[in-house]
Image: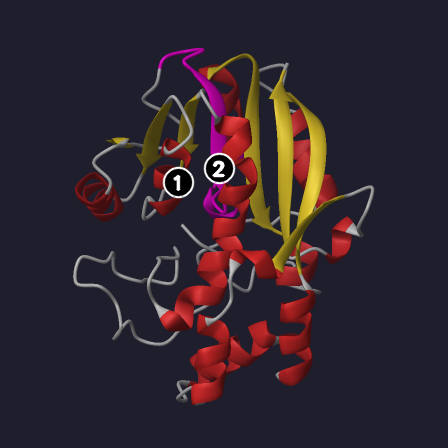
Amino acid sequence: MTDNQPTQPESDAHADQLVLTGERTVPGIDAENYWFRRHEVAYEYILDRCAGLDVLEAGSGEGYGASMLATRAKSVTCVDYDEQAVAHTRHRYPELIVHQGNLIDLPLADGSVDVVVNFQVIEHLWDQSAFVAECHRVLRPGGVLLMSTPNRITFSPGRDTPLNPFHTRELNAAEMTELLTVVPTCTGFQVQQMLGVFHGATLKALDEKWGGSIIDAQIERALAGTPWPDELTADVAAVTTADFDISPSDVADIDASLDLFAVAVRR
């Protein structure tokens, strides 16, 4: 799943690529590359934390993130609701265990994993508290929930309803903390760390180049259905994970972050 806005048609997609719907991001598309790298950086950040552990990715989408984690983890199990995504992941990433299922009724036993990864998914769910309770159930004592989501303050500024039509409820840092710690059906989680994803120096320069925001430059053209200038396509295609910074809330202004990233320990 993803939090990107509509992009150009996937004319440069690989033949075996999952269809780009606007609800999830996929690798290998120049016009999608900014959003893909913005998602991918979170997986890079947790590779060491997942080493040697049993990991569940709840809401695995295309499967590229779970495949990255599988290079370090003891095991990686995926659960996604979308049947097409599940079939694609099984075909493209045979090293993964993939289940089709509802995220508020995870097909895993109690206390069966050490880590639950949930990146750019919670904002799509109608019953967010029930999902958090399910994460608590399948984690072993002391297990970790790693969750990212677009920061409501910067993603849908000044709005009560999300800009992205695929989102049900977006969160700010305080709301995300409350969601994780106040769970009616279980003892909840202790939020060990709240981090934010920010533009690094290269992306800040591109923001200036494209009228204040390279994000807006992409979205405006996509919504208008106008062709991208070759230079914009080239700038977006050149973005890497190194162009993003992940900083904790005691170092950076978490309310100014693009995405929120919580590290929560099962109580």
- State which region is magenta: 109-130
- The residue shown at (46%, 42%) is 125
- The residue shown at (55%, 80%) is 217
Q: Amino acid at mark 1?
A: Met
Residue 118, label in figure: 2
- The residue shown at (57%, 43%) is 148
- Give the CA separation, mark 1 to mark 2: 14 Å
- Taking depth in this image into account, of 87 and 152 the one nearest to the observer is 87
Rendered image quadrant of residue 17: bottom left
Residue 105, label in figure: none
Rendered image quadrant of residue 258: bottom right
Work out whether 168 lies above or below 262. Answer: below
Percent position of residue 18, x then y: 25, 56
Q: Residue furthest right?
A: 250
Percent position of residue 186, x then y: 58, 15
Percent position of residue 208, x then y: 69, 80
- Residue 151 visible in rendering: no
- The residue shown at (33%, 27%) is 77
Q: Amino acid at mark 2?
A: Asn
Question: Is 1 situated left or right of 176 in this image?
Answer: left
- Taking depth in this image into account, of 154 and 64 the one nearest to the observer is 64
| Residue that numbered label 1 is attached to | 68
Neighbor class of circle 2 (other Cα within 10 Å; few <14, some 14-19, many 20+) is many
Closer to the chain start, of discs 1 and 2, is 1
Magenta residue check for 106: no
